[in-house]
Amino acid sequence: MFSPPPTPSLPARVAGSQRPCIAVGCRLAAALLVLLIGVPTSPALAVRPVPPQILEREAVPKVPLAVRPVRPEVELRVVPSVIGLPESQARSVLERAGFATGGISRVANSAAAGTVVAQSVAPRTRHDPREPIDLRISRGPQPEIKVLERPMVDPESLRPAVREPEREEPPPHDDVQPGAEPFRPPVLDPRVIEELIRPPVRPQPPSEPPPYRPPPPRDDVQPDFIVVPQLREATLQQARARLALRRLRLGNVERRPSDARSGVVIDQSPEAGTQLDRPVAVNVVVSTGPERVTVPNVVGQMLDEARERLMPLSRGQIDEQWIASQRPRGVVVRQSPAAGTSVRPSPPPRFRLHVSAGPRRVVPDVVDRMRAEAEAIIGRADLRVGDVREVESDAPAGRVIDQKPSGGTDIVANRIVAVDLLVSRGPPPAPVMLEVPQVIGSGEQGARAQISGAGLTVGTVEREHSPQPAGIVVDQRPRGGTQVRREARVRVDLLVSLGPQRL
């Protein structure tokens, strides 16, 4: 009996896919047909496979290698920094530097909306001007998203129930023994089928790069777009430098007084941020400082009237100095700054007024005068007597021996209102002298009585052996006959004998 050859296995069919495309397609169609209808085990239903035909591979024509043209050398330029600038201004800065703006991406950022927060090429580096520079624009801070609390839902409960179709069992074969597992065709991955039927990829010749073309001009940015810089609070030298960086020049310079410090720009035309299509001259106004005012003349006026007139200019900063003068009391004699002087109102100047205190008055000299007479003289000079202190001196009692301040001192200039006096209470009394009695050779009790009777006091008493009998005073200090002052309270020390020393 003739038996059919075995059916080729799946690895053999996969290996046959490496043959020409026509043979692969035929075998692939046969394999798919077998997988769909199944292969019976009965010899009567076996199909003899057709042996594959070997076809010659077509010769691939040789393609000449394409030579990529070398791009002409271009001078690298320094990339400017546009971080922190508005988008339109950043585009203008890049175009003036010779660079094109590439892709624009917008991200949430803490910077103001519309400002550049990053650029694809680092600033101050050299870069090919033919390659565009990408920018990252801020769209402002990201709004806070509040999450509402909702009950949790199981996503499986929301998925509709899909009923899987029942797989139909193939009819039983006559040659299948009872209890044997029926034949099921293997499941083939669709990705494997796609790889089997995909035609081979032929190498493509390298294409020539497109020629470089500058980016088309933008509608909102002109080729010579210029933004006027901020010149306020800058000096003239700084203003010229800022304008030179923008291809602008300094125009008319007007000087005008203002509260700003002298030498800084307080106004400009055109205003900062103005967009220009060509370089122009920018006119500025420079501050000359606060406007000067003329000091009024207050000499000859009363002090209160002069203060009221100078108050708007001095704002209360007025110093007064009273001097002796033949003019009436309270009249301004001199002023500083002088009348007619031009001063700045800010900061307010400080004025000094010399005010007349009337004719010159001095402190009278009352030294060597008696106390009553000196007090009368001081009262007539519109002064009062201050502290009076008495001391012992050789001058008679009641006579003034010193004063403070001294006579002739200007009363007004030193603002003197009282005079202190030093008065003598006479010479000190004569001291009382006492004579120390002679007690050597006397007994101890007798010596004590003599010293007390003379108004003196017995001091220390020492005892020692001597040829004199016991109890006799053999020495004293001070010596007998010495004169001492009673106020000194002198003590008399004694040396008393213990008698001869026994051997």
Image (cartoon, helix red, strand yellow):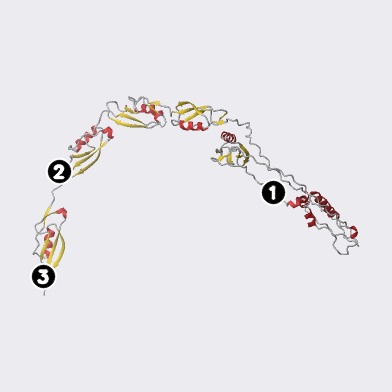
Q: Residue type at mark 2? A: Asp
Q: Which residue is mark 3?
A: 499
Left or right for 424, reference 19: left
Could you tell me if the residues under marks 1 and 2 are in contact, i.e. CB atoms within 8 Å? no
Would you place residue 346 above or below residue 50 in this image?
above
- Residue annotated with mark 1: 150
Badge 2, how many Cα within 10 Å: few under 14, some, many 20+? few
Up the image or down, 18 lies above or below 342; here it is below
Q: Amino acid at mark 1?
A: Arg
Q: Residues within 10 Å of mark 1 (few under 14, many from 20)?
A: few
CA separation in Å, label 3 and label 2: 55 Å
Dot 1 and dot 3 residues touching (CB under 8 Å) = no
The residue under label 2 is 394
Q: Earlier in the sequence, mark 1 or mark 2?
A: 1
* Mark 1 element type: loop
- Residue 160 in the image: x percent, y percent? 78, 50
Estimate the x, y position of residue 203 in percent, counting from the top left. 71, 46
**Residue 334 seen from this side:** yes
